[in-house]
Image (tube, rainbow, N blue to C red):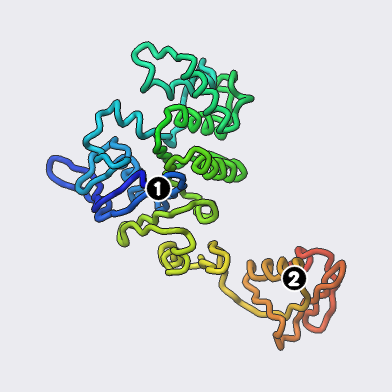
């Protein structure tokens, strides 16, 4: 891995005639090639502002941003188009253009005014399409694609631009959960296969925790905290950063879970996955299960059913839903 982006004491925000609004300040970080970095934070915290600043779409307030050793203000617009490509959140409202033609627009920094693709340009476009795995869509019209397919096309366009850095603003927005997983896995794979620096903002916390090489936790009060997901778990940053009533960070799994208030207890005897699922279901409705409970009420995991002892009565339950109904 090589150092692609170096940020020194960066402050971002907006300048108006009468005021300067600082969104975040004193950001110092290094981003390397071949890494997938995810930017996390609440709505309105400034994630898009940071991305626009790193992309040179809006000026920084203070500090320096180096890309491959050169300060961002020293680049011309044309030079930046050879270094940075950006995939935005908005759905591309494009009609009467094929997938291949849209991906081909990624070559515009190199083709000049007329946009005529050479043999080499076409080979780069085809390679980008293949890397994203949308070969079968190559001749399709953009308006016939699903949201997930369109997002893949925009990523292929960014790859065709052949820049060392790709920024993405909420690339999994508007996607269903399986498509979100597929998109994040694709970006992780591309960071490895192409050795590019891929930096994205996202609200998909659980996926970022499982896939990202580095996390940037952005908060109005706490600023920006940067590190590997595992390090941010161990030092308590994740637990404190997303601290909310009813949400608990589990250090052992490195994931968040919902913590409902416990209102009663019950004994639970058994083992295996069915024990785990019963325990989980009980916790969801506010019942704490305990194998060593002295409570006379008890659930026993049988080979093909469940025995619920409740108020002196014994009930055979076929499903976990039957147990919950019996408890209610």
Nearer to the camera, 193 or 47? 193
Q: Residue furthest bottom?
A: 294
Please give left or right for residue 181 compared with residue 303 in the image: left
Give x and y (percent) for residue 178: 62, 44
Nearest to viewer (mark 2 / mark 1): 1
- Mark 1 highlights which residue? 32
Mark 2 or 1, nearer chain start: 1
Q: Mark 1: which secondary structure?
A: strand
State how far apart marks 2 and 1 are (Cα). 44 Å
Q: Quadrant of residue 328?
A: bottom right
- Above or below 276: residue 140: above
Say which residue appears at 42% left-offset and 12% top-offset.
Answer: 116
- Characterize the local packing of mark 2: few (<14), some (14-19) or many (20 or more) Cα atoms within 10 angstroms: some
The residue indicated by pointer 2 is 275
Mark 1 neighbour density, 10 Å: few (under 14) some (14–19) many (20 or more): some
Q: Is residue 263 above or below residue 67?
A: below
- Image quarter of residue 59: top left
Q: Is 321 located above or below residue 126 in the figure?
A: below
x, y percentage for residue 61? 20, 46
Q: Residue furthest left?
A: 18
What residue is rendered at 59% in x and 41% in y? 179
Residue 191 as seen in the image, left or right of residue 39: right
Q: Residue at x 42, y 44 (%)?
A: 33
């Amino acid at each position: 891995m090589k150092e692609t982006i170096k940020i020194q004491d960066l402050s971002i925000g907006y300048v108006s005639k009468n005021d300067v609004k600082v969104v975040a300040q004193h950001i110092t970080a290094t981003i390397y090639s071949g890494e997938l970095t995810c930017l996390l934070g609440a709505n309105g915290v400034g994630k898009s502002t940071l991305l626009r600043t790193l992309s040179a779409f809006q000026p920084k307030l203070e500090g320096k941003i180096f890309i491959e050793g050169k300060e961002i203000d020293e680049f011309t617009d044309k030079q930046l188009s050879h270094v940075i490509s950006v995939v935005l959140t908005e759905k591309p409202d494009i009609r009467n253009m094929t997938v291949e033609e849209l991906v081909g627009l990624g070559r515009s920094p190199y083709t000049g005014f007329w946009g005529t693709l050479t043999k080499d340009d076409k080979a780069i476009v085809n390679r980008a399409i293949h890397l994203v795995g949308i070969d079968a869509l190559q001749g399709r019209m953009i308006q016939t694609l699903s949201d997930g397919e369109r997002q893949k096309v925009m990523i292929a366009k960014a790859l065709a631009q052949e820049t060392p850095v790709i920024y993405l603003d909420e690339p999994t927005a508007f996607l269903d959960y399986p498509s979100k997983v597929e998109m994040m896995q694709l970006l992780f794979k591309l960071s490895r296969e192409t050795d590019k620096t891929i930096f994205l903002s996202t609200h998909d916390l659980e996926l970022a925790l499982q896939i990202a090489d580095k996390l940037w936790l952005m908060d109005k009060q706490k600023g920006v905290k940067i590190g590997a997901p595992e390090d941010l778990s161990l030092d308590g940053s994740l637990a404190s950063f997303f601290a909310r009533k009813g949400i608990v960070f589990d250090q052992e799994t490195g994931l968040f879970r919902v913590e409902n208030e416990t209102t009663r207890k019950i004994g639970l005897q058994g083992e295996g996955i069915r024990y785990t699922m019963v325990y989980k279901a009980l916790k969801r409705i506010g019942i704490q299960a305990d194998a060593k409970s002295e409570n006379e009420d008890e659930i026993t995991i049988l080979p093909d059913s469940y025995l619920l002892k409740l108020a002196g009565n014994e009930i055979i339950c076929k499903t976990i839903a039957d147990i919950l109904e019996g408890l209610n």
